[in-house]
Image (cartoon, helix red, strand yellow):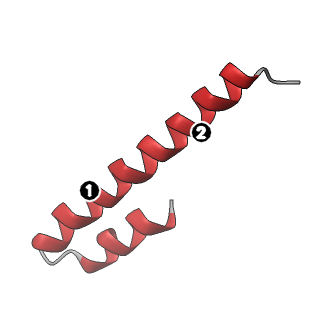
Amino acid sequence: MLSNEEKKAIINYRVQKAYDNLNEAKEVAKLSFWNLAGNRFLK
């Protein structure tokens, strides 16, 4: 079983990854790479 600290670390990692994917999607959308932008949201 995971400790509370381990759970928090996993949650923080996943939240950061979500923000990173959103920012990547915004950047590729500026270049009109719509398929790539859409794929960023599916991760």
Residue with the mark numbered 2: 11
- Mark toward the viewer: 2 or 1: 2
Q: Farthest front residue?
A: 4
Q: Position of residue 31 (x, y in %)?
A: 10, 71
Hey, what amino acid is under mark 1? Asn
Residue with the mark numbered 1: 23
Horizontal placement of 6 versus 12: left or right?
right
Compare residues 2 and 31 and report the one nearer the observer.
2
Instruction: Determine whether 20 is above or below 10 in the image.
Output: below
Q: Position of residue 15 (x, y in %)?
A: 48, 46
Q: Farthest right residue?
A: 1
**Mark 2 neighbour density, 10 Å: few (under 14) some (14–19) many (20 or more):** few
Horizontal placement of 16 versus 23: left or right?
right
Horizontal placement of 7 versus 16: left or right?
right
Instruction: Determine whether 26 is above or below 9 in the image.
Output: below
Compare residues 39 and 4 and report the one nearer the observer.
4
Residue drawn 43% across the image and 67% down it: 41
Residue drawn 34% across the image and 48% down it: 20
Helix, strand or loop for disc 2: helix
